[in-house]
Image (cartoon, grey):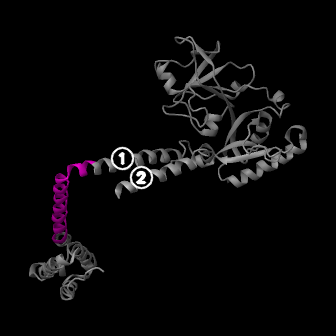
Amino acid sequence: MRPKPPPLAHALLRATLPRELRDTILGDVEEKFYRIARTPLEYGDARRWYWKQAIRSLNPALRIALRQPTRRHTALIRHTVYGDMMRDTLHDIRYAIRTFMKNPAFTVVTILTLALGIGANTAIFSVVDGILLKPLPYPEPNQLVSVWADYTRRADGPLREWLSFANFHDLRQETDVFSDIGVYQGFGPTLTGKGEAQQIAAAQFSVGMFSDVLGVEPLIGRSFLQEEGEPGAQRVTLVSHGFWTRVLGADPSVLGTSLMLDEDPHVIVGVMPAGFRPPFVKNADVWRPMQRNISQSLQNRGFAVMRGMGRMAPGVTLETARARATAIGSRLEEQYPESNLGVGYALFPLRDDLVAQTRTGLWVLLAAVGFVLLIACV
């Protein structure tokens, strides 16, 4: 049970303090009183201190200031309370330092234990924040969705299956629901002509993936043109900022030069911004447009080797996009029963899809290190 301040001194303070400052100053004085009266032996000191504050309030000069409070007078009154609080805080700090100096082994163990707990929590929270909490580094990230083929109605197949180019092309026509949809594939070409031959990570995707779906433009140069996705068009490529710096020497005149990928020249048309990593094939250093003959690809709906990603149109909800995708899937089932029977579309928020396999593990790990910090504090 908390000790009570002297009733008469409390009444005296209430009577002498102006209405504008009464609650604030009384709250500060009483909080200081409770800190002083931590034990029965200290209760007498706390009572004397409380009476001292009440008597101070009767000082004629201070009473005039209280009746007509100004900014200067308010600061004077608060200084009376907070000055004592600061002195007590410094006293507590000095006492703690003396205690630690008397027990150096305990002090070292305590500091190391807390450092371990705080450091582990900071490190894990940084990971959780970067992966689960921070929004994706693209414009309007909530509009981004991953696009899969849904095979759950075909002999209990997977919910997330790769797409065929033909099924992707049909879904891409729904321009009132999707701003754009793209598909991509990873590949590992051999780079020659830049020192020793080496295999690098790369990806190819449908035109518009960076500029229209992700909403990211090159730092230098341009994105792919629509005609560069046509069969037989000149091979072009975008390179990462790291590749441009590391391999190409950050040459500003690199645009228009060629890279030999699998002994096939690719003209460099742009350099992506520093730190840019798309949510697919994240270690890729070069990207090229996917060149496909649409009329031929539409004939082979069962050839599913691509993964999809899309941006919903402004104002369209995920539920609306899913409903439209389901309707398209049903229509394709009727038109192409040989390849599309039991096949639909599955749409997921891109962030949720990217962390689906790590979300639970990261939260469990964060809880575990939080428990370690709790033990360290105890």
Q: Seen in the image, is 87 located left or right of residue 286?
A: left
Q: Which residue is mark 1?
A: 116
State left or right for residue 44 relative to residue 24. left
Say above or below: 236 vs 361: above
Which amino acid, mark 2? Val
Q: Would residue 252 be seen by someone viewing this image from the given angle? A: no
Left or right of 141 in this view: 7: left
Front-most of 287 and 151?
A: 151
Type of amino acid under label 1: Leu
**Image quadrant containing the C terminus:** bottom left
Q: Residue 144, percent across and down?
A: 63, 45
SS state under label 2:
helix
Is 328 contained in the magenta span?
Answer: no
152 or 18, nearer to the observer: 152
Q: Toward which corner of the image does residue 90 lie, by quadrant?
A: bottom left
In the foreground, 161 or 121: 121
Q: Are marks 2 and 1 in contact (CB under 8 Å)?
A: yes
Which residue is drawn at the image coordinates 16% and 62% (left, top)? Answer: 91
Point out residue 73 in the picture as x, y percentages from the top left corner. Answer: 17, 72
Residue picked out by circle 2: 372
Residue displayed at 51% across by 23% down? 243
Give how far across and how far down residue 228 sits, in percent.
69, 24
Residue at x 18%, y 57% (from the top left corner): 99
The chief SS type of the magenta part is helix
Point out the tag, 2 or 1, that comes first from the N-terminus. 1
